[in-house]
Amino acid sequence: MRHYKNFINGGWCAPNGGKEIESIDPATGDVWAFFPRGNDVDVAKAVEAAHLAYTQGKWGSFSVQQRVDCILSLADVLEHRWSELVEAEVRDNGKRASEVEAQFAGLHTWFRYFAEQMLDIESESQQLNNQTQGVSSTAHYSPFGVIGVITPWNSPLMILAWKIAPALAAGNTVVIKPSEHASASTLEFAQLCAESSIPAGVINVISGLGQEAGEPLVKHPLTRKVTFTGSDFGGRKVAEAAASGIIPATLELGGKSPQLLFADADMDNAINGIISGIFLSNGQSCVAGSRLIVEDSIHDEVVKKIIERVSYLKAGDPFDPKTQVAPLANEMHLLKVLSMIADAKNQGAICVCGGAQQYPRDRPNGFYVQPTVFTEVTPNMTLWREEVFGPVLAVIRFSDEAEAVRLANDTDYGLAAGIWTKDETRAQRIVQQIQAGTVYINHYRSVDPGSPIGGFKLSGYGRELGPHAVKDFMQVKSVWLGTAPCSDPFPLTKH
Ligand code: NAD
């Protein structure tokens, strides 16, 4: 049984008060590890260590090149040793090992990309902005200082990399608060950080509950910016605390993403994209394409094909490469998903596939749900309006393009959307009308360091990744240089 500790100033520390959180392996239902249940005292220690590393340690005095070299040393460690992190994340959140491996094999690339981006920013910030007679100015980009980093349980380490790679490249130090449901891979990652050349105190991790450790992190007076990924409920709390401390926050929140499927689409391609959009990672993905809006004339054929493809998927041990359906991440989440399925049935949606808990022979005590499809869904139903964050697809029909767009935008969220059609003009027309931070055409789910990700409406504000990611962790400072004497504003005149 593993007992993890917090990672502060390059060392491992038991939590103040000695409390721990049980981590239950969702495939077996057994406790497999304990995380520290950190509180405000632990958070204060970590923030102060991060602040000292920024103000008095090497990190703040390093040149950009020295900082970049440290980040590249971490990238090298990750490139060679990512496989050591896989077991912790699979046992923590139950995701299939093959999916976790695919994410982790690429972890180093996020660090390399944003280190490069910082080198470009440095050369840009030395350029003259303005040169008028007797004075010139340049724009300098400065780090904020300590960044509070709060992550969810669904893809803890990949989302962490999206946040800290640009934050560190920008010259900040970080205090990370991973989800209480999946802290292990982040704590194991801290060990690899300690083995890179990043100095002590630059990266700190406090595990604990949202209210007990997350909130004090946002409220600490030395935390200068917060980057949060999680539910809109948690995001609202973080935004309120950040507002009262007048610090900026980036919020990556939930989604209820639509997939618009037109009759002229390449059907096999679309079905693959729609199935991967909702059933990969068990729908526990922020961009899960959970609402299928399908043209009337192909509705029945599409539903039949989806059922054929997902009703016999093999559930089981997430470490077994043959497993296609892994457990949901924790029991509380399983109960929430089952209750949303029950509500959908009670509200009149027709369950045409799945709709129940399942008990694989090799993992009978795990938190498994069948891939589930509902038809005859209407926009007033909870299933249409609220994020399930599970393997549940809601299907609705449309008769013309205007109705499809109206249904797609009929949500409080705005994270992603998919459009499936061979008509490029139509696709581009719809892109202009869709209220979502990412729109995929004849494709779904890609992420790349060069493409920003973030939401419209309740899906949050600010963006991660993309060409501005490093600058988002910096503040602009205008520096003016006088090259001629200042004139006297009140020259002596005789009255
Ligand atoms: P959550 O909001 O319950 O928790 C997220 C993190 O916030 C955890 O570390 C938690 O401890 C912390 N937290 C909770 N309350 C807090 C508070 N008052 N102050 C500070 N921190 C607090 O979310 P979750 O259940 O872990 O994650 C699932 C949600 O995340 C889903 O809604 C999903 O759509 C969303 N998500 C969004 C993206 C994106 O990029 N937009 C990516 C992944 C997940």
Image (spheres, helix red, strand yellow):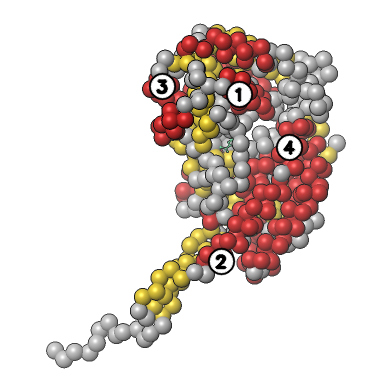
At mark 1, the secondary structure is helix
Pick whichever of labels 2 and 1 is earlier in the sequence. Answer: 2
* Residue toward you, 409 or 266: 266
Q: On the picture, is 454 further left or further right than 284?
A: left
Q: On the picture, is 383 further left or further right than 27?
A: left
The label number, if any, that marks residue 401 in the structure image = 3
In which quarter of the view is residue 452 placed?
Answer: top right
Residue 147 location, x and y as percent? 59, 54
The quarter of the picture where the N terminus appears is: top right
Residue 297 location, x and y as percent? 48, 11
The label number, if any, that marks residue 123 in the structure image = 2
Residue 470 location, x and y as percent? 57, 55
The quarter of the picture where the C terminus appears is: bottom left
Q: Residue at x 46, y 48 (%)?
A: 243
At mark 3, the secondary structure is helix
Q: Amino acid at mark 2?
A: Ser
Q: On the picture, is 455 further left or further right than 274?
A: left
Pick whichever of labels 1 and 3 is earlier in the sequence. Answer: 1
At mark 4, the secondary structure is helix
The label number, if any, that marks residue 102 in the structure image = 4
Q: Residue at x 57, y 14 (%)?
A: 302
Pick whichever of labels 4 and 3 is earlier in the sequence. Answer: 4
Q: Amino acid at mark 3?
A: Glu
Pick whichever of labels 2 and 4 is earlier in the sequence. Answer: 4
Residue that sits furthest to the bottom in the current view: 494
Distance between mark 3 and mark 2 Cα atoms: 47 Å
Distance between mark 1 and mark 4 Cα atoms: 22 Å
419 in relation to 11, above or below: above
Q: Nearer the viewer, mark 2 or mark 1?
A: 1
Q: Is residue 87 visible?
A: yes
